[in-house]
Image (tube, coloured by chain):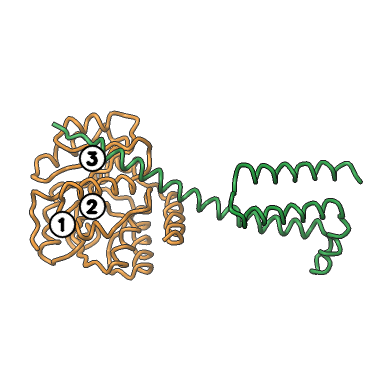
Amino acid sequence: MKLIQPALLIISMLALLAYLRFFRSVLVDRLLALFIFALQVLAITFPEATNRFAQSFGVGRGADLLFYLFASGSVFVYVLLYGKLLSTEAKVTQIARTLAIRDARKGN
Amino acid sequence: MSINFEKVWIIVPAYREASVIGAVLDSLAATKYQIVVVDDCSPDTTAEIAERSRAHVCRHCINLGQGAAIQTGIDYALSNGAEALVTFDADGQHSAADIPALLEGLDKHKADVALGSRFTTGGAAHNMGGARRTLLKLATLMTRLSTGLNISDTHNGLRALRAEAARKIRITQNRMAHASEILSLVAQHKLKFVEVPVHISYTDYSTSKGQRASNSFNIIWDSITGMLRR
């Protein structure tokens, strides 16, 4: 085992624990997180297997396949976060509006 | 249904307008309409000056943008029994003398919305630069294509709405794309509209406060993401 492998395993484990502890509590999300973690462990422990898997999709190396998946996953995350941002902005706007109307003052 | 002019509310969204808002409110105070100024968290004395007039003043605790300020004014006016609402910029571009024509447009044509137009017969835009004129014409063309409304002007902040129409028009575009959003909602709800000639006076102050041509991209971006949200 190369030095990078245990380091990556620890990082993956910490990410999974943080996700389960602080973020999602829905069962489906937790199972999906566990599934992704299992894939990470396999990919880190058996890098050659990812090469063979990638080649079955016509991609030269496992690292390339992971990069493509990461890139498309990132776009999904950006869209998701932008949606959350817009939704949060709408809520903040409503709070500010409610306060402004509640505290309106009539001039002289 | 004819409009009770004492139940007409003028909505004035304002941000950093301390140097001009006093004069703008003086011109409106001479009318019989109700006035609500929505101060969008100005760091200057805009709100304090507004409170010295007879206007009602709502203050946003954070800066949200002109679209959000107009919607706050609409909500406030509707909750105070408004029968018709007029949106009016705080930077001195608009003339209080145009308001009766807008309301008459609603009344005479039994319209839901009266849109002020600089470019229709009888309208005028004083001291408007050539680049701005071209940009506005392009924006109008785009709006005509996207909404199907036969209009001669867009991004004109001077407009009047009946209360029933104002309830249907819910502005979600907090920043400058609200002008296009309002027109989209007019088309979506099949509201009856009429264009009324108005007079817009550009000054060095209003031009420096107004939209830069480079901001057009932001307006288009907000419009597209807004459509995705709906």
In the foreground, B120 or A34: A34
Q: Relative to A25, is B208 on the left or the right?
A: left
Chain letter of disc 1 in the image: B
Look at label 3 and name its amino acid: Val
Chain letter of disc 2 in the image: B
Q: Residue at x 23, y 52 (%)?
A: B158
Going from N to C along the chain, the mark reached first, 3 or 1, is: 3
- Mark 3 near mark 2, Cβ–Cβ under 8 Å? no
Classify 10 Å Cα crowding around label 1: few (below 14), some (14-19), many (20 and above). Answer: many
Look at label 2 and name its amino acid: Leu
Q: Mark 3 points at which residue?
A: B37
In the picture, one chain is orange; tell me its letter: B
Q: Name the residue under label 1.
A: B102
Query: In the rendered view, would you say B205 is above or below B194?
Result: above
Q: Quadrant of residue B53?
A: top left
Q: How far apart, in angstroms, are the residues tagged by discs 3 and 1?
A: 19 Å
Q: What label sits on residue B158 in the rendered view? A: 2
In the picture, one chain is green; tell me its letter: A
Image quarter (top left, top right, bottom left or bottom right) of the C terminus of chain B: bottom left
